[in-house]
Each structure stands twice: as C-alpha cells, then as structure tokens.
Image: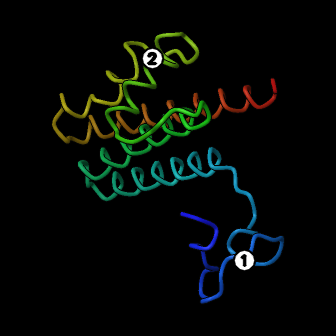
C-alpha cells in the first residue's frame, strides 16, 4: 500500500495527514483502565445473574471478568492476548510464577475451577468471590505499578 491508497472515512478524497477533526483526532484512551472497567461490569453481571438464581450465567461472567483482568495486565506488558488459553498461560508465566501477583495454585487453577464444578449456587458464590478478589488484586497491582513510574 502507498499513501495514495488511503482515503478519509466518509469521503472520496485521498487521505491527507494533518491535525484536525475526525476519528484519528479523538481522545487517547487508557486501554488498560478500560479493560479493568469492563471487568468490573462483568462482576456486576455475575452478581445480578447470581441474584436471579442463574448459576451458570453468573459463573460465566465471573470467568470472563478474571480473564479480562488478566488480559489488562498482559496488555500493559505488551503481551499478545489472542485467546483465553494464551491469556491464562501467559498470565501464570509473567505474574503468578514470578510472584508478582500471589495466587495460590496459580491463575490457571483459579480460573479453570469452572471445569471441575457443577454450576451450583455454592460454586457460583465462591467463584464470584474469587473473581472479586482477583480483580481487586489486579487493580492494586496496577495502581502500585503506575505510582512507581
């Protein structure tokens, strides 16, 4: 591709690199903060579905929150986050195994509990608490990391 191959969104004119208004001139967002906010929303979804007696849905949202939180820290480390399996493996290597974030038994064991348990009220409640604690540890780690920079 050459510069001539590009056009501005919504126009037929050739793209001209300049400072101005448009999608490229938007506000810079903190991707890591956005991912952690999504994790908080997933926790809320887990709580709501738990309160509705939807154990499997609650477990799914708790799982999603944990994987998403791990994805946030891996993204901050500029690690590729293509699949849930790679996120789980890479998080264990970069954070759990090194002791940067203490997780008894490792992240894989924590997050994949859902494969070893039936979707019951007891497990959904326990898994939700695990997800909340995990998110809290990630947010604490991230805050500390930002203050050290």
Q: Which mark is residue 5?
A: none
- Front residue (pair 5, 51): 5
Quarter residue 22 falls in: bottom right
Residue 134 drawn at (x, y percent): 50, 30
Quarter residue 148 falls in: top right
Up the image or down, 92 lies above or below 123; here it is above
27 left or right, relative to 95: right
- State the residue position of label 2: 93
Helix, strand or loop at mark 2? helix
Q: Which mark sits nearer the N-terminus, 1 or 2?
A: 1
* Residue at the spot 52% in from the left edge and 10% down from the top edge: 98
Figure coloring: rainbow
- Front residue (pair 56, 64): 64
Up the image or down, 28 lies above or below 130; here it is below
Alpha carbon separation for disc pair 1 and 2: 40 Å
Quarter residue 16 falls in: bottom right
| Circle 1 crowding by C-alpha within 10 Å: few under 14, some 14–19, many from 20 | few
| Circle 2 crowding by C-alpha within 10 Å: few under 14, some 14–19, many from 20 | some
* Residue at the spot 54% in from the left edge and 49% down from the top edge: 40
* Residue at the spot 42% in from the left edge and 13% down from the top edge: 104
Eye-nearest disc, 1 or 2:
1
Residue 112 drawn at (x, y percent): 28, 29
Helix, strand or loop at mark 1? loop
- Front residue (pair 8, 67): 8
- State the residue position of label 1: 22
Residue 82 drawn at (x, y percent): 39, 42
58 left or right, relative to 130: left
Up the image or down, 32 lies above or below 117; here it is below
Residue 99 drawn at (x, y percent): 54, 10
* Residue at the spot 49% in from the left edge and 38% down from the top edge: 71
């Amino acid at each position: 591709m050459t510069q001539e191959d590009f056009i501005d969104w919504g126009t037929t004119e050739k793209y001209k690199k300049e400072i101005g208004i448009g999608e490229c001139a938007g506000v810079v967002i903190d991707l890591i903060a956005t991912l952690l906010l999504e994790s908080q929303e997933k926790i809320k979804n887990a709580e709501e579905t738990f309160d509705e007696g939807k154990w499997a849905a609650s477990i799914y949202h708790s799982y999603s929150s944990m994987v998403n939180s791990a994805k946030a820290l891996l993204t901050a480390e500029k690690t590729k986050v293509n699949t849930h399996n790679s996120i789980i493996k890479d998080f264990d290597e970069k954070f759990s195994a090194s002791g940067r974030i203490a997780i008894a038994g490792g992240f894989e064991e924590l997050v994949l509990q859902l494969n070893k348990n039936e979707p019951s009220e007891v497990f959904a409640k326990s898994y939700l608490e695990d997800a909340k604690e995990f998110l809290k540890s990630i947010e604490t780690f991230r805050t500390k990391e930002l203050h050290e920079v």
